[in-house]
Image (cartoon, rainbow, N blue to C red):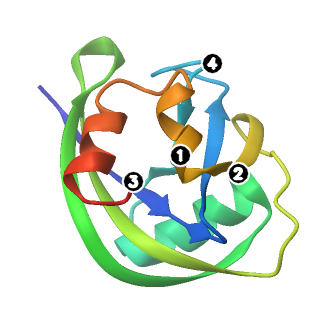
Amino acid sequence: MPEIAAVGAIAVRDGALLLIRRGHAPSRGRWSLPGGRVEPGETAREALVREMAEETGLTVEVGELVGEVVRPGPNEVTYRIQDFRVTPVGDDAVAGDDALDVEWVPLADVAKRQLSAGLLGTLRQWAVI
């Protein structure tokens, strides 16, 4: 099964987590962390800066690696996703690229959202929420 390197952003500000509603598979229509594939020649951190700009319009400073998950994707691929803490520079998040929507969700309300598979448990395990 082919493995695809990917990244995700954990951005928390004023008691809220930045989430996007996915526009494409996997997890189309569900809320997830912003992020995506690492392109050839990119580091994980470079990919995360690019993906955040594409999906949310935000410039970010990438902090520490919080953890890594492996998730099945379409067409028998596997995504190995490294999730990093990020600090946005600026305030105006706007949905772009494959994001249908972007929102700062209060940490207490994250569990009420229809999240991508496994995200809620992972966020709890990593003490994000």
Q: CA distance from mark 1 to mark 2?
A: 24 Å
Mark 1 / mark 4, whichever is N-terminal:
4
Mark 1 / mark 2, whichever is N-terminal:
2
Three-letter amino acid code at the position of disc 4? Gly
Foreground mark, 3 or 4, reads 3
Mark 1 / mark 3, whichever is N-terminal:
1
Where 38 falls versus 2 (above or below)? below
Residue 11 visible (yes or no): yes
Three-letter amino acid code at the position of disc 2? Glu
Three-letter amino acid code at the position of disc 3? Ile
Residue matched to label 4: 29
| Neighbour tally class for label 4: few under 14, some 14-19, many 20 plus, Cα within 10 Å | some
Q: Residue furthest front?
A: 108
> x%, y% of residue 122?
26, 44
Foreground mark, 1 or 4, reads 1
Q: CA distance from mark 3 to mark 4?
A: 22 Å
Residue drawn where x is 42% and y is 73% of the image: 85
Residue drawn where x is 69% and y is 36% of the image: 98
Quarter of the image holding residue 45? bottom left
